[in-house]
Amino acid sequence: MNNLDNVKNLRDLVDYAAESFGDRPAYRYFKNDVEEVKTFTQFRHDIYGFAAGLRAKGFEGKHIAIFGPTTYLFAVTFQAVTASNNVAVTIDIRLPQQDIVQQLEKADVTAVIYDSSLTSLVDQIREKVDFIDTYLEMESGIASVSLETYEPWEIKDDHALCLIMFTSGTSGKSKGVMMHSRGLADNAIANGIRTGFGPDDRFLSSLPMYHIASLSDDMLWGLCTGACVCIVRSVRTIFSDGKHFGTTCAPFVPMFTELLYKKMCSEMKKNPALTKEEAKNLVIGEPFRTITTGAAPLSETTRKAMGEFGIRMVEQYGMTETHCNIATSHGCETRTGSCGKLLKGFTAKITDGQLMLHGDMIMMGYYKEPEITAEVLDADGWFATGDLAEFDADGYLYLKGRKKLMILLSNGENVSVEKIEHALLQNENISEVVVYQKQDAITAQVYPNPETTGNLNETEKEQTIRKAVADYNSKNPVYLHVQRVELRDTEFPKTSSNKIKRAAFLNQ
């Protein structure tokens, strides 16, 4: 398996990586603050030994939940569960306990493999449910179950269900997205090739692997490209760990990008003689050069500011329902406002302004929810993304906002609330904002930035926010003006992935 063209599923991808990159480092991480290194050969050995052990104990066709933060053992467990013809159910461990129990029941989970750090949570869940018959702690479980010798076995069906991953539920109820091994492998390969990354690259892994972005952009990209996945110890040590590992790139959420920018600027204030590249080297290391981002629109201001520090910002667009990425600006020129070009394997069309996609990387549907599936996936396999978009003459994709987040005013104007929110958030005094329609008026509810407005009294704070909104209005046409402003004292309710629960706010 020395050619990516021959890869048809995740197990093929593991074989390709082991045979192509062998004793090169696949993972670097800390265990009790001591660095450990696993090669691609060792990674495959650990996966297949555990997978064979699961099969020997009768695990086949089972729905197995994986509880854990991003670790090497999480990666081994996920690959072993899917390689042994079982279905992995990744669980967001930050959710309220009752939500976790609901997801376990909804996904028909009968076994749990968990990280030792979550023993207390798992013990509490054991007391609440009677439909799970097996619990395995990752480290001891892998050690006790794994086999050194075993007979090879086949993946039964590349398109069979291998993963159920729940959406974050920003717009309502969380849904279990059904994915297959072929789709996950194809998506990782299509994007991995576009990145241009290779065996000399080192990915800074700081996002949770129970979400599709890290699972694909860290774990699976590494297998495609031969790059090493370097796992941070915690959010607090992201940049120091990245510097230690000599990382070259990272998938970051906007919050991490902003934090990196502030730290680099802080170094320059402490030592004005530093160049911007020297400040970057002090904070995250000389080799670091690329950030991929996709959780929110990337402003041209941010792109230029990071570029001055020698860091290229690469925008991507994707969702769980497409086995991860849809488009990327990797491998093509950067165009303001565009998330790049579609990945190989997708066919697209625009229907009533909405981006529709077709191809083998579209989800199988939402688990046990055929009616909701039918709302977004038609009989011919066209998937309605819910995103308003357009392509330019060269095939670059431009997102215009979520279809559900458009408001229609009585004057006939369609307005994207996301665009207004994004513009308002460029003001340093606004920490969070939700824009919505109230009595035919565009209304912004704002949570002021406590760092810049914390010392102001209520009147001063309101005046500051109203000035920020007035500044926005002065730069935009009348039909996009925010007419009402509301202030709130607390942050908006959020999902476990730190996205605002818009539906919960609008329905309160």
Image (cartoon, rainbow, N blue to C red):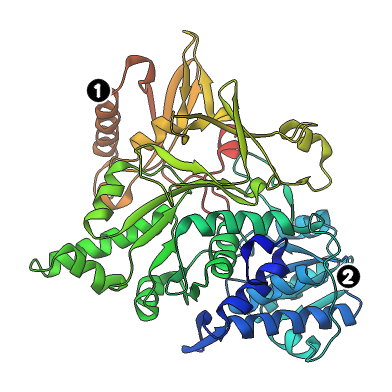
Residue 100 appears in the picture as rendered: yes
Query: Quadrant of residue 242 in the image?
Result: bottom left
Residue, disc 1? 474
Is residue 383 found left or right of 463 in the rendered image? right
Mark 2 nearby-residue class (10 Å; few <14, some 14–19, many ≥20): some
Instruction: Say which element carries label 1.
Output: helix
Which residue is at the front of the view, 200 or 294? Answer: 200
Query: Quadrant of residue 218 in the image?
Result: bottom right
Which residue is at the front of the view, 19 or 480? Answer: 19
Query: Most extreme residue toward the right, as rendered?
Result: 58
Work out whether mark 1 precedes mark 2 in sequence or the reverse, and give the earlier one.
2
Seen at 24% across and 31% down, the residue is 467
Whether the residues at callouts 1 and 2 have beta carbons within 8 Å, the answer is no
Seen at 30% across and 22% down, the residue is 476
218 relative to 439, above or below: below
Amino acid residing under circle 2: Glu
Residue 481: % across, % down: 35, 20
Viewer-side label of 1, 2: 2
Residue 77: % across, % down: 70, 75
Query: Most extreme residue toward the left, as rendered?
Result: 273
Mark 1 nearby-residue class (10 Å; few <14, some 14–19, many ≥20): few
Is residue 170 found left or right of 257 in the rendered image? right
Residue 94: % across, % down: 60, 62
Residue 91 appears in the picture as rendered: no
42 relative to 506, above or below: below
Task: Check the picture and name the quadrant holding the N terminus.
Answer: bottom right
Amino acid residing under circle 1: Ser
Instruction: Residue 60: give its label.
Output: 2
Residue 100: % across, % down: 72, 60
